[in-house]
Amino acid sequence: MSLSCSFFGTARNRLGESPLWDEARQCLWWIDAQAVAPCEGWIHAAHEDGTPRASWRFARAVGSIGLTENGLVAAMADGFYLVDEQGEARQWVACSTHGGAIRFNDGKADRTGNFLAGQMELREGTTPKAALWRLSRNGLAHIVESELRLANAICFSPDNAIIYFADSPEGCIRAHAYDADRGLLGSRIGTIDCLRFGSIPDGATVDSDGNLWVALVQSQAVVCLSPTGRLLHRVDMPVPFPSCPAFGGKELDTLFVTTIADSGRYLRTDHPDAGRIVTVRGLGVRGIAERRWEMKTEPSE
């Protein structure tokens, strides 16, 4: 394996997250989840050569994004929004935030077009109040897992039969049987320990072989793990705090990794390239094209 790491364009984020390759538009989308006030969040896009395509600012935090036919679906602080091709957002579904004590965080579409997003606590209480939500193709949202503190690493096996996700403070990734048609989590069928690598898990993705690529935010690395947790590869990053990986490019063989300069909480660095997106080439594996969230109804006005 002959690897090369470089930086994608010139963008530098405070809290880069949710990279997403758009095959139809041949561009990379991502968010800045901790932008400077009064702007609470950004969604960005750039072409494969790193030249900017779009930058949209919003008055609320953006936790994660997914593709639609005519734009994006976004899990913002208080619920799910539709974002059109001009960057205009309108709310689709409001979700409980327990009085602003939680907001949405990591999210991803499953292989059939449902969008799942998890929440994170902003103020830790006695009982965890964050949850993992599913926005189905009929536009309805429901909770599929509750009592979480910081939902992360949401991704799916190639056949959509397994969902992986983390409650990051636990230091592991959970694997559950997944019923995509009904939006139900089955029994827990595995646990992948990440603390043995010196980090809690942040974002994750699955390649076409079914292996997981996990951002080790505290260890400045991305690891490739088998579904049973066996270490297959480790890629050290040129900057601290990698947050989320995604495969993209024309052949889906480039790994894009967002990073953090200032999370607004515990992670902060003055490294001159902190917050930039890292590209990794030469891995010898390919990703899986992202499924678009398929709306079967129109949002009500």
Image: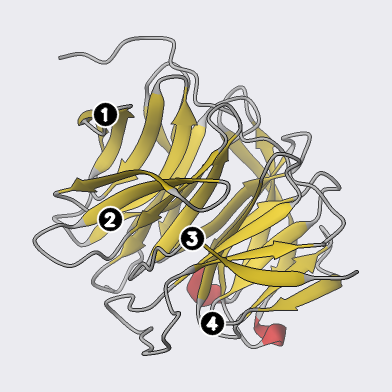
Label 2: few (<14), some (14–19) or many (≥20) C-alpha neighbours in 10 Å: many
Mark linked to residue 103: 2
Residue 32: horizontal and vertical position, in percent? 34, 59
The reply to whether callout 2 and callout 4 are in contact (CB within 8 Å) is no
Indicate the amino acid at tag 2. Answer: Arg
Q: Which residue is found at the position 72% from the left and 65% from the top?
A: 191
Residue 192 visible to an observer of this rendering: yes
Above/below status of 9 relative to 77: below
Mark linked to residue 239: 4
Earlier-in-chain disc, 2 versus 1: 1
C-alpha gap between disc 1 and disc 4? 32 Å
Residue 47: horizontal and vertical position, in percent? 51, 44
Indicate the amino acid at tag 1. Answer: Gln
Residue 205: horizontal and vertical position, in percent? 66, 53
C-alpha gap between disc 4 and disc 3? 15 Å
Earlier-in-chain disc, 4 versus 3: 3
Residue identified by numbered label 3: 9
C-alpha gap between disc 3 and disc 2? 29 Å
Residue identified by numbered label 1: 86
C-alpha gap between disc 1 and disc 3? 22 Å
C-alpha gap between disc 2 and disc 1? 25 Å
Label 1: few (<14), some (14–19) or many (≥20) C-alpha neighbours in 10 Å: few
Residue 133: horizontal and vertical position, in percent? 42, 41
